[in-house]
Image (spheres, rainbow, N blue to C red):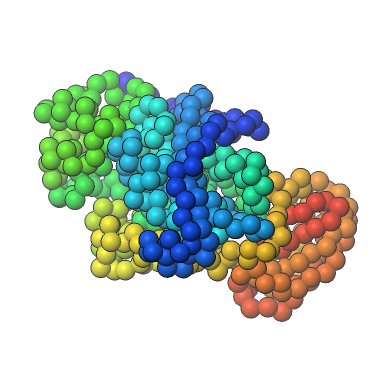
Amino acid sequence: MKHINAFVVVLALLPAWGKAQILLSDSLLESYTAQELVGLGVGNAEYGIEIYRIKYATIDPFGGPTIASGALVLPLTPNCYHPLAAYMHGTIMEREGVPSRLSGEIVVGYFMGGTGYVTVLPDYLGLGDSPGPHPYIHAASEASASIDMMRAAREFCAARNVQLNGQVFLTGYSQGGHACMATHKVLQEQFPDEFTVTASAPCSGPYDVSGVQAAAMVAPDPYPAPYYMPYVIFSFGYVYPGIYDDIGDIFQEPWATELPPLFEGNNGSGPIDAIMPVVPSQIFHDSVLQSFTNDPDHYFRVALRANDLYDWTPNAPVRMMYCESDSHVFYENSIVCRDAMVANGAASVQALSAGAGFDHGDCAFPALLNSKNWFDTQKFPCAFNGIDERPAIVWSVYPNPARDMIRLTASDGMGHSMRWILHAADGRSVAEGNLAVTYGEGFLELPEAPAGLYVLHLMGDAGSSVVRVVLE
């Protein structure tokens, strides 16, 4: 029995808890001064930080209620307006090896928090305090767990009078690159009035999981991390009930017996790779491997295709970092993704190398550092006035990119009197003026300014809103 008709249903269930309270609890784990962060290697730290473990309500892969956890890094910056950043971690098998337990990737939160970002690092489902198996490389639950943690962080900040400026930055590495891309896609398509993504930087992620990355499944070649393969298979067996009746229908012995106990959240990759063949496809029955290879609509390939993340059109800037020598997550994932998005009409998508000679582990630091430096060029200064994250009226811009004139359209179709300020990506005010909106439309003459990304802040009887404008 191979029924996988739940793919579309799970995405439809993502609104989760609506406007109900999501934050369940928080506990302070550690705190550092700026000087202590510098001593830990965060050379550009400007502020001290506090690190909290938070638990929050979310949904499981089937739309039912569950809980999840993650780390929240709070910059200690009074009288400051902060962007919200989310970092999605790479592949983790051990339930306790997650950011909320101060695992190694928490250092990303140190770098982000120490320079003024309120930063969330979700553990995902099935890890940390979340019950059940981890749905590995499952785009829908990666996104729902991340978005609900962002909601919980906003509640946390509101309770402590921590000001958010409305900017949202997303990044992640390896599996986290996949989760980052999934989160950006769902935020844009399902929650554009709740969060507006300023920029995302997925790094070394398997965005073409059914194509480029699935090549490792059928290749007769050694692969450096064989445990990825059964991790995906067990994950999909959980997320898509009925995709196989018994793991023995998929795996040969001894792996059908020896592998399942190693995927209960108590082991790292070492014990699994110790019993896996260096050519991962050898664990499959020949009939399964041949069917997958020859049938483009094989049930596993359909499941993988449901978790591809390249064929959409992001509105916000996207910068994918990769390394050509990455033997774990092939860099062609980023090239395929960039080309598809550009063909779809995306205005600002890049795929950049962080170092041609770096393998997967060594690629992480330069890729994430490049991403953070890129975010810093777009982050508003500390003193920049806060922006309503959930405006009552949504504004659309045409054309965008533009050069001389733009048409602003208000979602309510009404007349408004607005004041506008155009900010460069670094927060500097470039121009300002007044805008008269009649029957939901107003026209704004753009100033002469260098090409690039700008932020248009609209203020008036329609409230406060922000839209991005790209000048050609």
x and y percent of residue 190 in the render?
60, 41
x and y percent of residue 107 in the render?
39, 55
- In the image, 253 versus 372, the foreground residue is 372
Name the side, left or right, on which 256 lies relative to 72.
Answer: left
Name the side, left or right, on which 405 lies relative to 247.
Answer: right
- In the image, 56 versus 425, the foreground residue is 56
Quadrant including the C terminus: bottom right
Q: Is residue 238 above or below residue 457?
A: above
Name the side, left or right, on which 88 lies relative to 219.
Answer: right
The answer to whether residue 359 is seen in the rendering is yes
x and y percent of residue 152 in the render?
57, 39
Total number of numbered labels? 0
- In the image, 247 versus 162, the foreground residue is 162
**What residue is at 21 percent from the left and 47 percent from the top?**
225
**What residue is at 39 percent from the left and 35 percent from the top?**
128
Name the side, left or right, on which 235 lies relative to 66.
Answer: left
Write down the quadrant of residue 147 in the picture. Answer: top right
Quadrant including the N terminus: top left
Write down the quadrant of residue 449 in the picture. Answer: bottom right
The answer to whether residue 341 is seen in the rendering is no
**What residue is at 15 percent from the left and 35 percent from the top?**
283
**What residue is at 29 percent from the left and 24 percent from the top?**
244
x and y percent of residue 320 in the render?
43, 60
